[in-house]
Image: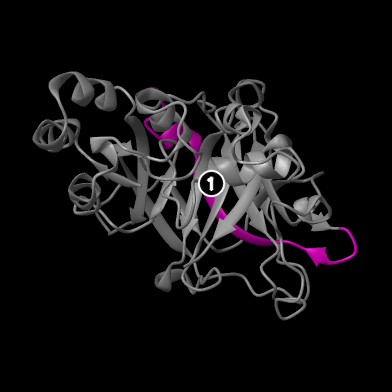
Amino acid sequence: MTRGSREAFRSLALQHLSPEDAEKWLGLLRPGTRLEVATDTDDVVGRLGGVPALPAGAEWPVWEGYGPLSFVASIDCARLSAAALDIDLPEAGTLLFFYFDGQLDDGEALVLAEDRESWAGARVLHVAAEEEVADRGTPAGLKPYPVVPLTARVEMTATEPWHPSVRAAFAPGAPLGNRYDHPVCSQEFIDGLWEFDGEVGHQIGGHAHSVQNPVEIEIAEAVLDGEVPWDDPRLSEEAGHWLLLAQFDSEDAADMMWGDAGALYWLIRPEDLAERRFERAMFTWQCG
């Protein structure tokens, strides 16, 4: 939902919550790596756009029947402050993010979490540091996005009061995804959170900044084939199994526009991340 320093979040929490609830809420904050457009003096940890460096034997990701995916971003794991995060990122190598962005069919086919047939339209690849790689030319019909270098800094992230983790802490019986009767849902507290940073932005780890309902719920619904109602505890339990791997916002500098100024999200289960099973990452996108 938003980013800031722990002390700033503490100050806000103590203005609106009891000391006990404030400490409980602060315990739900998570560190995330914010990615921003780099200047000439910044340390570069990755980039938006351009062409990916792929191993010689690796095939460009393709959505069978639709065509190759567009390359979105590259992140150098060794340059991230991974030790400061609470997810088990690789210590080295490169994460590559691909997405079927509609260039080949004028946006007719959509990659949707709720449509299993479309899941091949978004991919994450991890290229190990020891693999020999080379920049791969973009497949015919695709125009690469302009290269935008990214720098990073670690910040604390807070999520929506109706996120499953916050709801479980303060109102476990409340309806999933909705406000409930607790000061963390007060408009004054929520307005204070938005004042930290209202932009989605690009990010690795931490709490996702969802444009609509928490993306974890959206992924849980998809995994459960949309057959579990929101009042079923299985949906909340499944949502709790997913962590944000990366989010990429619309970005003018890279000519990237995801829907109506929306964002792309990749989530993964902790055990799959630990085993480097990036093919099991789930994708969704949201826009206003």
In the image, taking residue 43 as reference, residue 276 lies left or right, namely right
Q: Amino acid at mark 1?
A: Val
Magenta stretch: includes residue 66: yes
In the image, taking residue 131 as reference, residue 15 lies left or right, namely left
Examine the rendering and report whether any part of residue 125 can be seen: no
In the image, taking residue 36 as reference, residue 107 lies left or right, namely right
Query: Mark 1 packing: few (<14 Cα in 10 Å), some, or many (20+)?
Result: many
Q: From the image, tell me which residue sits under label 1.
A: 215
Magenta stretch: includes residue 254: no
Residue extending farthest right: 65
In the image, residue 129 above or below residue 83: below
Q: Position of residue 117 (x, y in %)?
A: 84, 54
In the image, taking residue 27 as reference, residue 261 lies left or right, namely right
Q: Which residues are magenta?
A: 64-83
Considering the numbered disc 1 on the image, is that residue within a helix, a strand or a loop? helix
Q: Position of residue 75 (x, y in %)?
A: 50, 45
